[in-house]
Image (cartoon, rainbow, N blue to C red):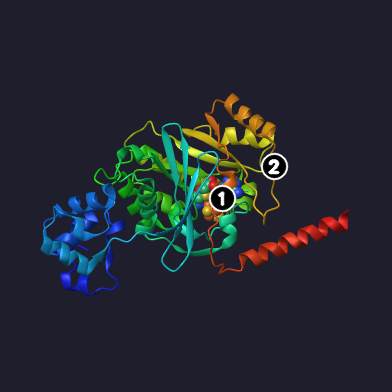
Amino acid sequence: MANASVDQMVSAAPRHNLLGMTEPQLAAFVVALGEKPFRARQLIKWIHQRGVSDFAAMTDISKVFRERLAEVAVIEAPELVHEHRSADGTRKWALRMAGGSLVETVLIPEGARGTLCVSSQVGCSLDCSFCSTGKQGFARDLTAAEIVGQLWVVNRSLGAFDDTRKRLVTNVVMMGMGEPLLNFDNVVAAAQLMMEDNAYGISKRRVTLSTSGVVPNLERLAGAVDVSLAISLHAPNDALRDQLVPINRKYPIAELLRATRGYMASLPDRKRVVTIEYTLIREVNDLDEHARELAELLRDLPCKINLIPFNPFPQSSYQRPEARRVERFQRRLQEAGYIVTVRTTRGDDIDAACGQLVGRVIDRTRRNERYRTQLAQKDSIITRVS
Ligand code: SAH
Ligand code: SF4
């Protein structure tokens, strides 16, 4: 962008959306318009600290430059469609993206902490067998503006731009719809904005990227951005993981753990640990032998384990294990020396739980149909046997 002429930029339609630009990107943009780079800092503060989307309101910027900006740029966030509040305090916003897709963003308050779960894609191409997003197929990547825009809209809706006491979002997890590492550049730019001091200033320990294991892009992540990492493992061996997380057939567990170690080693802060996510599915991956094998597998990895009891959804025949079984699995791992948390399901009454950020995606892959057919066949086999 630094080398692009103003005319090239101005002639490009539609107008540039500044919402998704990091400070260095904005600096290149303003320099191309003949301004000093420090204007980028002013702009970024107006946009991300004060929530202003109208250039005319940016009073410390000259009128001439504001008018110029209005000609070539916009500050455009996703459209807020509706907001739900759960009885347990969880809040969910439905946002309409360009083209009409709906994406949901969830805020989970826990004491002084507020964790915002954001989406990186509309749908997902990876088709994990226990995930409702995966069952919808893939529609498109979200832009950087649409990813960071989820935080922007939530802050605006909370009144956080006008009143710092209402800044309830202290943590961001990329655990909504989509596989963040398959939308690399936009996810990295959005994460950088979330952490930039002149934008949201969230600590790097508090922005977490969750991946099912796109190994080459995990390798690229080292050096590109310094976020916390969560690995969606879900199985202690390749045979089982191949069934649950199909991308494992391409990048098996050993490669995934090697890339994970590489990323952790690239971080300047050696005390950081990776989170291992493990969705517990009844009688699929929740047995003692799985806990034992998992404890063995992760022995040399600085990690904590987050168990997620499976959240059922209509198209799935999997079941959530009983609470006793979840506790037992947790205990087995704790006995092996791990720090193990269980993700409590929140926002059940508003469908805000993991893997239930359904949105409405046009299913371009006919995956839904295929899946229903498989289920129907399974049912008929069961009927025949019994
Ligand atoms: N694609 C990324 C991030 C989005 S999914 C990833 O897979 O990591 C966020 C987390 O929710 C993942 O750990 C995912 O495995 C989990 N998840 C998805 N569907 C679920 C379900 N039905 N029940 C419980 N956890 C689920
Ligand atoms: Fe995609 Fe993650 Fe769902 Fe797998 S679990 S289908 S990678 S969103």
Local crowd at mark 2 within 10 Å, few (<14), some, or many (≥20)?
some
Identify the mark at residue 282; answer none if there is no mark: 2
Question: Does residue 279 sit above or below 269 in this rendering?
Answer: below
Task: Give amino acid for label 2.
Answer: Arg
Q: Alpha-carbon distance for marks 2 and 1?
A: 16 Å
Identify the mark at residue 228; answer none if there is no mark: none
Residue 47 locus on image (x, y percent) = 26, 53
Q: Secondary structure at mark 2?
A: loop
Task: Decide if residue 247 is in sight here.
Answer: no
Task: Decide if residue 276 is in sight here.
Answer: yes
Q: Residue at x 66, y 30 (%)?
A: 328
CB under 8 Å between discs 2 and 1: no
Q: Earlier in the sequence, mark 2 or mark 1?
A: 2
Quadrant assignment, res 278? top right
Q: Residue at x 69, y 49 (%)?
A: 318
Task: Give amino acid for label 1.
Answer: Gly
Question: Does residue 246 sit above or below 353 in this rendering?
Answer: below
Q: Residue at x 59, y 46 (%)?
A: 349
Position of the N terminus, as image quadrant, is bottom left
Residue 240 locus on image (x, y percent) = 64, 47
Residue 62 locus on image (x, y percent) = 11, 58
Q: Is residue 38 left or right of residue 271?
A: left
Q: Residue at x 22, y 57 (%)?
A: 26
Question: From the Cβ of disc 1, is ligand 1 less than 8 Å away?
Answer: yes
Q: Which residue is mark 1?
A: 355
Q: Secondary structure at mark 1?
A: loop
Q: Is residue 269 left or right of residue 40?
A: right
Question: From the Cβ of disc 2, is ligand 1 less than 8 Å away?
Answer: no
Residue 183 locus on image (x, y percent) = 42, 58
Q: Nearer the viewer, mark 2 or mark 1?
A: 1
